[in-house]
Amino acid sequence: MPDAPGLELIRGEIEQDHPGAVLDTGFDRGQPALVVDPAQILAVLTWLRDAPGQGYRFLSSLHAADYLPAEPRFAVHYELINRDRVERLRVKALLRDPSAAGPVAAEGVSGRVLGFSPGEEGGRPRASVGRETGRRARPDTPSPPPPADGAEELPEIDSCVELFPTAEFQEREAYDFFGIVFRGHPDLTRILLPDDYVGWPLRRDFPVGGEPVTFTYNERAYG
Amino acid sequence: MAEHQNTNSSHAGGAAGGVPHSAGRGAPEHIGEGAATGPAAGAVDPAAGSVDTELMTINIGPHHPATHGVLRLVVDLEGELVRDLKPVIGYVHTGIEKSCESQAYWKVIPFVERMDYVSYFFQMEAFCGAVERLVELEIPPRARYLRTIFLELNRIHSHLVWLGTTALDLGAISMLWYCFRERDKILDLFEMAAGQRMHTRYFQVGGVIEDIPRGFEAKLREFIAEMPVRVGQYEDLLDRNEVFLSRTKGVGVVPRERLLELGVTGPLLRAAGEPWDLRKAFDYLAYPEMDFKIPVGTVGDGYDRYRVRVAEMVESVRIVEQALDGLPEGPFIADDRKYVLPPRSELSTSMESLIHHFKLVTEGYRVEAGEVYYSIESPRGELGCFVLADGSAKPARVHFRDPSFVNLQAFRDMAVGTYVADMIANLGMLDPILGGVDR
C-alpha cells in the first residue's frame, strides 16, 4: 500500500497532468484512497494504469455506495491493484443525486420512501413479476436503455469498460442497484434484477420490505 | 405489459360471463393456439436457409443440470458450434446485500455465508476480517490458526465438490461418489467443531465462536494422513483417462493477458501461468507463517485448471497440517468486551459481563464511521468484502466482490468457437457458484 506521503506524491503527479482531478486523499484504517472528480475519472484511471512507475493495471472490484445524508450522495469505488509492487489503491468518485433539490434533500428523501411503499404504484407490475411469468426481455434483442421511469434523473459517470473490461458486469450491477448510469457502457441493462423492475433497491432510502413477494399462484395469469 | 393486462381482463370477462374458474374452459384455447402456431412455425423454418449456415439461438437453463446452478445461457449455434454466448444471471438473487443493511453486525454473518454456499467459511472470513479492520481489533494467534485450518479445509471441500460435479459432466460418474465421500469427512469435522455441517457460523468478529473440541485433532490428523492418498487415487482415475484428456486438453484456452483484463482470479488465472494468489500477496491470518506452494499451469486449458485445483488440494492439506502442528495455546477469541461476547461462565458471577452480554446481543456494537475493503483468496479467486459503517450498530453497505461473478465474464472467451459439449466442459472448469454470482 502507498503510505500517506506516497499517496500525496501520487496526487501531486496526477495534478501536474490533470489539474483539479484529485479532490482529496484519504487514509482510513490503513487503506489509501483518492477522491477524484467524477468528470475526470477516466483520465485518472488511465494515468494510474499507464503512467510509468505506477501500473495499477488490475481492477479488482468496482462497486457503488450510498452515503445518504451526505451530499454528494453516491460514490463509485474502484479497488485497484498494482500486482508488481503488490499494492492496493482505492479511487472514489463522489456523485451528486441530480434529483435531490439541494438543501431540502431531507424532505425529498422521506417522500421517496413513501413512493416505494407497496400499493402506491397503481396498475404497475411489481418488481420480480417478470421472472415468474417468463416475460424477461430476451437478452439478444436490444433491450431498452435505462427504464423510462418518468422524469427521474440519474447520476452519471463515464464507464471504464474500455480501460478495464472486467468492469462490465460490475458497472451493470452498480446501475442495477443504485441507478448510477455509466456513460459509454456497451450494454447497460439490469443484471441481477428483472428488466422491468422499478426502483433502485440498494439506495439507502429504498426500504427493506418495499417490495411485496410475488408468487405465481397470486398471479392467475398463466395463459 | 399491455398484453399482460389484456389477458387479465379477458380472463376476468370470462369469469363474469358465469363460468367459474374451471380448467375445462382454458384447455381448448390452449389447444387452439398450439394448432395455429404449429404449422406456421414448421413452414417458416425450412425456408430460412440450408442447415449449414443457419444460426440458431438456443436457451440453455436456467434449470439445467450442466449449468451448475440456476444459470441461463443464451447461445447462438451454427450446427454444433457456439458462435456467440451470453450468460443471463439473477435467477437466485435474494438481495442479501440489502438484507445485511438491516442487521446488526454480528447477525450479518449467517447471511453472507449463504452467498457462495460451497465456500461459506471464506465469506465469513471476508466479512469478519473487514469488520475487524473497521474496529481495529486484533485477533489472537490461536484464532488466526484455527481460521486458517478451517479455511483450507473448506478449500479442499470446495474443490472436491467441483471435481466431483465437473468429472460427472465429462462422463466420469464414479468421481462424484469418491469426492463426496471425502467431502463428508470434512463436513464431519465442521460438525464436530461448530455443530453444523454447512453454514457453520463458526467465525466471529474477534476470533472463532468456540475452541475445537477434544478429539478433533485426532480426527483431523486422520484426515490429513488420508487425503493425499485419496488425491493420488483421483489422479490415477483421471490423469490418463482417454475421455477426460480429450475433453479437457486444449479446451477453453484464454490468453493470460485477456484473463487479467477480465479480472479473472483464482485457479483459472493460475492455470494460465500467472502465479497470483492473495494468500502470498497480502498478509492475512496465519498464511505468512505457512510453507506452501502455488501451483501454476502452463497452457491454461481445462486440463491445467484441473491439475491446478488438484495440486491446490494437496497444498491445502499441507497448510492444515502445519497450522495444526503450530497451533498456539491461548484464547480463541479476542478479549474485548465491546465487541466479543463474554464467556458464558461469567454471566452468573459478573454484573459487568451480564451488561456486556445484554448490550451485544440486543443492540450489537457500534462501529465508527468508515469503510474497508478486505479481500481473501477463496477457492474461486479474489473474494472481497466492502463494508461501509455509518456509526450505527448496522452496516450501511455490505458488498461482496464475488469471484464467480467476475470470472463468469471470461466464459464467452472460453466457449465461443467451440462445440456445445466443450462449452459444458468449460463451464465446469470455470466453477461458478450461482449463489455467489447472484447474491
Image (spheres, coloured by chain):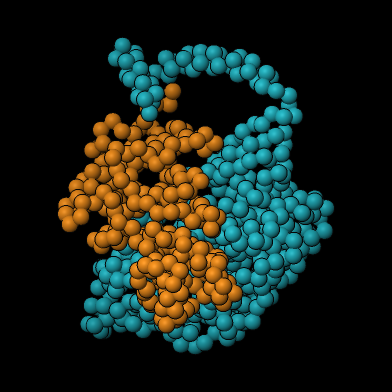
Chain colours: A orange, B cyan
Eyeballing the image, is B165 above or below A24? above
Residue that appears at 46% across and 74% down: A13
- Residue B84, given in percent of the width and then of the height, sits at 63, 41
Say left or right for B357 vs B308: left
- Residue A109, given in percent of the width and then of the height, sits at 21, 52
Residue that appears at 33% across and 58% down: A95
Viewer-closest of A36 and B293:
A36
Viewer-closest of A169 and B180:
A169
Q: In this view of the protein, can residue B345 be seen by the observer?
A: no
Q: In this view of the protein, can residue B243 be seen by the observer?
A: yes
Residue furthest bottom in the image = B329
Residue that appears at 67% across and 61% down: B256
Which of the 4 quarters of the picture holds residue B97? Answer: bottom left
In the picture, the quarter occupied by the C terminus of chain A is top left
Eyeballing the image, is A97 above or below B22? below
- Residue A14, given in percent of the width and then of the height, sits at 45, 71
Say left or right for B122 vs A93: right
Viewer-closest of B109 and B352:
B109
Tally the marks: 0
- Residue B36, given in percent of the width and then of the height, sits at 54, 13
Which of the 4 quarters of the picture holds residue A133? Answer: top left
Residue that appears at 73% across and 24% down: B50
Say left or right for A9 vs A50: left
